[in-house]
Image: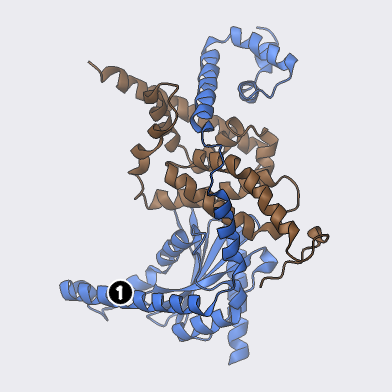
Amino acid sequence: MSSSRDGANADAGADGPASDRFEEDVLALMPALRRYSRSLVRSDPDGEDLLQDCVEKVLARRAQWRGVNLRAWAFTIMTNLSRNRHRHTALHPQVELDDDLGLQVETRESDPLERSRLERALNGLSAENRSVLMLVVIEGYRYQDVADMLAIPIGTVMSRLSRARHQLAEAMKDDNVISMRRPK
Amino acid sequence: MTDELNTVSDDDLHAYVDGFLSEADRARVEQWLERNPARTEEVRQWQGQATELRAMFSTYARSDERDRALLSAASGRQAAPPSGNRWNAGLGGRIAAGLLLFAAGAFTGLYAPDILAPGRPEQLAQVGESLPRQAQSAFLIYASEVRHAVEVGPDQQTHLATWLGKRLDHPLNIPDLSKLGFSLVGGRLLPVNGKAGALFMYEDASGQRLTVLLGRNPDNRETSFRIDNSGGVETFYWIDGPIGYAVTGEVPRALLQKVADECYRQFESARETKS
């Protein structure tokens, strides 16, 4: 058995209540983790896969957690995992087909065409730019928080955010020209 | 014209869109935007993106009834020590993989005798050249694996060294990179230059990984340190008699060089103490 004797949880006898509480905390984070994970990848199955990898890693590293802000810590781990995967799929792009299976299944209050175009534009972003955009826009982290989480200077956060926004706008614009001519 | 023209930066515009400005700064940016229709259009696009993105992923922020099972499965996997059965299963798997490789070899040998004709010098040179390529593929394939990155974990270091040393037919020590902030994730057997090779994987506290690959070197020569970069993946490699070494990662070159130096030093000193 792996001996868990970290001083931080000294009040708990061996690996009893303390580890349970940790798992409860992770459980409470699952919705946030699920959303963030899906926002980083191309398809629902990829999102669930990344989520599982992340949960596994978070549990494996619980001894390294400093006891503050579990959410940010888990998000950092997720971001690193997604970057590894992204690089892997970029070099071995066999999952390209997932593209169209992606989002249409879900929500549809807004124009579905618009949404699938945005989804496509998102998939054109680099993993680095995409994760910064999502951490700010969807997860609501401040720029300095993102810099701390990813261990990069705040200037890099700003340039990644800016690049992501410009690239999305550009992609949507290009798409526009095509889709306005296509009907009729 | 006015001072305000110079007081609104791109960063301000992002902060405006993201709602991070104070009341006063907000007003200042809005006034400025009134006089800059092109930027106003851009800011509108960013706001539109943000709204759309939030709507797009909001439905995923939910619990799932399988979450608890997922968690306990994940923690169970870590708690359970590798049992005898699991070990045997791994061995079986390796034998199966070996047979497959053998079958593939026989197949290609049958249909492409010319390409695989062994012993031609230029062929050997190519094999030597491809050490960094093989190291990079191994890095790309295994570093992104979370659950099956290695066959044998760090808790069985001695076994790992003996086992891989035997397969490589070369006594083997596993470098300790903790001074540089990297701890051992584990190791695996894999083909290098068509023979059994060894891969060790390391990881720092943030999950950044690197790999150390050892393979038999077909043409018994020696080289100095060399470096190879492919798509951001950096490899330091060197050949020392019968064995080729390659250290691969996606970390700054200076750090990777330190790792390579350290590995070289430790492999050397182990060899000297043995002989």
* Chain containing the residue with disc 1: B
Q: Position of residue B107 (x, y in %)?
A: 21, 73
The image shows residue B14, relative to residue B23, as above or below, that is below
| Quadrant placement of the C terminus of chain B | bottom right
In depth, the one of B17 and B254 nearer the eye is B17
Residue pictured at 46% horizontal, 48% vertical: A86
Q: Which residue of the protein is positioned furthest toward the left in this rendering?
A: B111
- What color does chain A have in the rendering? brown
Q: Is residue B58 left or right of residue B192?
A: right
Q: Which residue is mark 1?
A: B100
Left or right of residue A110, residue A27 in this image: right
Chain letter for the blue part: B
The residue sitting at 25% across, 18% down in the picture is: A183
Q: Nearer the viewer, residue B74 or B210?
A: B74
Q: Position of residue B57 (x, y in %)?
A: 51, 33
Residue B161 seen in the figure: yes
